Amino acid sequence: MAKMKDSLIIKLILGVLVGLIIGLYCNESVIGIIQSIKFVLGQLINFTVPLIILGFIAPAITKMKSNASKMLGVMLLLAYFSSVGAALFSMVAGYTLIPKLNIVSTVEGLKELPEMIFKVEIPPVFSVMSALVLALFLGLAVVWTKSENFERLLDEFNNIMLKLVYAIIIPILPFFIASTFATLAYEGGITKQLPVFLKVVIIVLIGHFIWLTVLYGIGGAVSGKNPFSLLKHYGPAYLTAVGTMSSAATLPVALSCAKKSKVLDDDIANFAIPLGSTVHLCGSVLTEIFFVMTVSQVLYGQLPAMGTMVLFIILLGIFAVGAPGVPGGTVMASLGIIISVLGFDDSGVALMLTIFALQDSFGTACNVVGDGALALILNGVFKKELAQNK
């Protein structure tokens, strides 16, 4: 996974560079062909989004039945509210800071794009919201009826979708990115906005550390323990996450770090840290919120309405819990609501995929360290039960 993510990052960077060079120097005929390629690739990606939602969220629900306890429910709620809290914090920061970045919208005074040479539409099988509701209902119904055959079918569908993502969607992303940046460079505005995104990445990194401070503060208050006694052991896990860009690859190190602390029960660590690596994505969500607001300002000339952002955050929290374990999984899982709720077009989607992937390692590191805070909160909530079992 780590090697594949490294390879993808390199390909995305090359895609950006190649796209910018082509867009700056190509003629109208070439950009017309590139536009057509971008449209078809965008259609393919959009077609798979509802299937990814169904293929990952429904099987995730069915797998919870063996651990369907109060502790599981509390951990899932903690993960959801941590992600939503991080998103709301990021939204407030976005409305406060983004207008001060002096972003000039690229929608005015640009070179006009030519007509596409060809256009092939590939409509999705069903809408994103239909996929989400179907995944939730189907997963719950399988658990309630104990339908083992259907559960196996969902597991197989999960494997099928994972294979499609790795074999088709991930490989075409660099070409989609390159074609998008070629059209943006041809228009003439994107090169002026690169310094803005460097500032945004720095702001997001600061936001990660602020949110981790909040989480560990809550963990200390709930557990009655010194949160620094746990946090101080997480250095190796943070560095491993930055290096591998993978929560799964970091899991053994994260478990080892968590167990070095005397404030965390071993049973809690064994339960919460692996589960958190799957369902708790506070760093990725915080990043995505600030990035979608920045991209909206850059490409469309305005920030999304607050009501729209709140709806997006509520839904994003659900998507984050069921996000697939692929590069940029949070963005991949939420592409549907980025398009349907925020109204992003192919250029907005491509820009989001690119800048999110370029900082993916830091979002993953925030997720991993944040799992320790949730484990500390869980330890405090169930400390009486843990004492009785000993």
Image: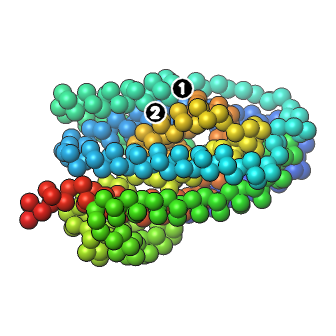
Q: Quadrant of the C terminus?
A: bottom left
**Residue 66 drawn at (x, y percent):** 18, 44
Instruction: Note whether 186 is above or below 204 in the view shown.
Output: above
Q: How many marks?
A: 2
Task: Find disc 1 in the rendering and name its residue.
Answer: 124
**Residue 95 drawn at (x, y percent):** 66, 45
Task: Name the kind of residue labelled 2 in the image.
Answer: Leu
Q: Residue at x 80, y 51 (%)?
A: 102
Task: Name the kind of residue labelled 1 in the image.
Answer: Pro
Q: How is the image coloured?
A: rainbow
The residue lying toward the viewer, choosing from 222 and 17, is: 222
**Contact between labelled residues 2 and 1, with CB atoms less than 8 Å apart:** yes
**Residue 83 drawn at (x, y percent):** 45, 48
**Residue 333 drawn at (x, y percent):** 49, 41
Residue at mark 1 to residue at mark 2: CA–CA distance? 9 Å
Answer yes or no: is residue 99 visible.
Answer: yes
Instruction: Note whether 9 is above or below 296 in the view shown.
Output: below
The residue lying toward the viewer, choosing from 336 and 44, is: 336
Q: Residue at x 37, y 43 (%)?
A: 159
Q: Earlier in the sequence, mark 1 or mark 2?
A: 2
Task: Find disc 2 in the rendering and name its residue.
Answer: 51
SS label for mark 1: loop
Q: Quadrant of residue 300?
A: top right
Instruction: Note whether 176 is above or below 269 in the view shown.
Output: above
Q: Quadrant of residue 235?
A: bottom left
Q: Residue at x 40, y 76 (%)?
A: 232
Q: Quadrant of residue 341?
A: top right
Q: Residue at x 45, y 24 (%)?
A: 130
Crowding at dot 1, Cα within 10 Å, few <14 / some 14-19 / many 20+, comes out as some
Crowding at dot 2, Cα within 10 Å, few <14 / some 14-19 / many 20+, comes out as many
SS label for mark 2: helix
